Image (spheres, helix red, strand yellow):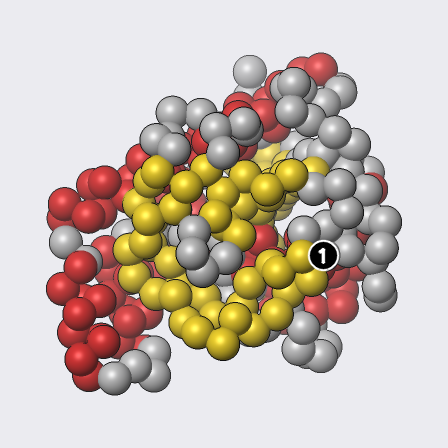
Amino acid sequence: MSKPRIAVLNAAHRDENTTRNFRRELDASLAEFDATDGTVPDDFDYDGAVVTGSRSSVYWDDDWMRPVKEWVGEAIDRGVPFLGVCWGHQLLADVLGGTVEDMGVYEVGYSEIEHTGDSRLFDGIDETFLSFTSHSDAVTTLPPGADPLAENDYSNHGFRTGRVFGVQFHPEYDAKTARELVHRKDLSDERRESILAEITAENYRQASEAKLVFDNFLEFVREVRADGVDSGTDNRTATRAGRSD
């Protein structure tokens, strides 16, 4: 069977780390689009789609976000499976009628996260796991009908509705990406040095378990492609009820 064809909406403002990380982690035929230029696919002829992180906020009134949200909304309505990561997680929640807000704090560094154990997206991942995080916005209200999949003391870290999955953490990050991000952020010297000290080979090894979300998502995509119907006992029809344009 050929590799699934995945549209990657890259919202990282041309950060080369993002392109490298997703190309490494997604064993699929990828078509990448620079979302921050407002560039989206011309059609919906994809087996699935992934939306990356971004330094922007979903609730900003940036011109480039409108075509991205419109394409994502129509693709969801057409049944295209989605995985959103960090900002992508928040964008999917917003498009589906959830709420994204500033947390008032910044979660950054390796964090412990718990998942419910109820979703195939986390197959093979310990219920308490480690992953790199970097966000000050969060999904504070899930989309109507969505199931929470993961969380920690900061926020929701995962949800599902129908063929749509979102994760707040960054399973794709490597050590280079993490270090460069920390150096760019407006942090106190003490906090910066503390976070940099956590970016070790051992923590990266432990956090690599979370990368299974990519394999699990692609397996779901392959099943949807083969069946022409939703797969998995925890699946429900996606809805955009409550969405405000």
Identity of the residue drawn at 77% across and 56% down? 97
Identity of the residue drawn at 71% across and 15% down? 227
- Image vertical order of residue 224 relative to residue 75, above or below: above
Identity of the residue drawn at 62% across and 60% down? 140
- Image vertical order of residue 143 relative to residue 145, above or below: below
Spot the residue most to the front: 153
Q: Which of 40 and 184 is in front in this view?
A: 184
Which residue is disc 1 drawn over? 98
Q: Label 1 crowding class (10 Å Cα cut-off): few <14, some 14-19, many 20+?
A: many
Q: Quadrant of the N terminus?
A: top right
Q: Nearer the viewer, residue 76 or 129?
A: 129
In the picture, measured across the screen, residue 31 lies left or right of residue 185, that is right
Question: Mark 1 is on which residue type?
Answer: Gly
In the picture, measured across the screen, residue 89 lies left or right of residue 21, that is right
Where residue 183 sits in the image (x, y, percent)?
26, 76
In the picture, measured across the screen, residue 69 lies left or right of residue 197, that is right
Q: In which quarter of the image is the C terminus?
A: bottom right
Where residue 100 sits in the image (x, y, percent)?
64, 65
- Secondary element under disc 1, as helix, strand or loop, is loop
Residue 224 visible within the image = no
Q: Residue 192 lies in what quarter of the image?
A: bottom left
Residue 130 visible within the image = yes
Where residue 237 sits in the image (x, y, percent)?
79, 32
Q: Nearer the viewer, residue 209 or 112?
A: 112
